Amino acid sequence: MKKQLLSILILINITNVYAFRDMKPMTDSEIRASILSGSIKSFEGECPCPFSRDKKGKVCGEDSEYYRTRGKILCYERDITDGEVNTYRQKYSITDPKGDPHGRLDFGINTEENNTKNPLTSPEMGGSSPGTDSQ
């Protein structure tokens, strides 16, 4: 029983590593847009945000839920703090393209492409090859 459970846990971990490997990075603005979209879609009514339109096609403005509840619904990027963006990024394991310039996660898997792109080990990038001294 313990061997089966251990095998299942190992398989889940391996699957997670490869699932995250194909994940696309998102900018802070893209994350904010995703949060806003979910907030607005979750609203049950006709005027979630000031820029929304009612059934007659009139802009909601101050009649919107946003004004009535003083921001309980999110309508603008400025409504979402950097902390909320970071929480979203962690919750969904999303990378930041600024921290991942090649648009992928690097789990330390050595490939020729990874070695040539690494400024610490790539001679053409000013680094030294593993096992050599750059002094």
Image (tube, rainbow, N blue to C red):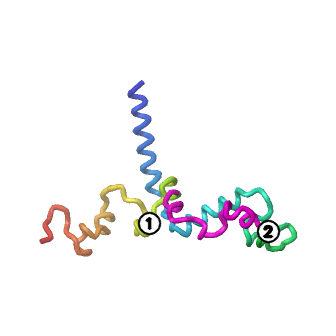
Residue located at (51% from left, 68% from top): 27
x then y, percent, for residue 117: 32, 69
Q: Is residue 51 left or right of residue 4?
A: right
The number of discs equals: 2
x then y, percent, for residue 29: 55, 69
Name the image quarter holding residue 72. Answer: bottom right
Q: Which residues lie in the magenta part?
A: 63-87
Q: Residue 56 versus residue 17: which sits nearer the camera?
A: 56
Q: Quick one: label 2 or label 1, which is nearer the N terminus?
A: 2
Q: Residue 68 versus residue 94: which sits nearer the camera?
A: 68
x then y, percent, for residue 46: 80, 62
Q: Amino acid type of disc 2?
A: Asp
* 84 inside magenta stretch: yes
The residue carrying mark 2 is 63
* 119 inside magenta stretch: no
Q: Amino acid type of disc 1?
A: Gly
Q: Residue 111 versus residue 89: which sits nearer the camera?
A: 89
- Residue 15 vs 82, above or below: the answer is above
The residue carrying mark 1 is 103
Disc 2 versus disc 1: distance between alpha carbons?
A: 42 Å
Name the image quarter holding residue 58. Answer: bottom right
Residue located at (53% from left, 57% from top): 88
Residue lying farthest top? 1
- Residue 43 vs 97, above or below: the answer is above
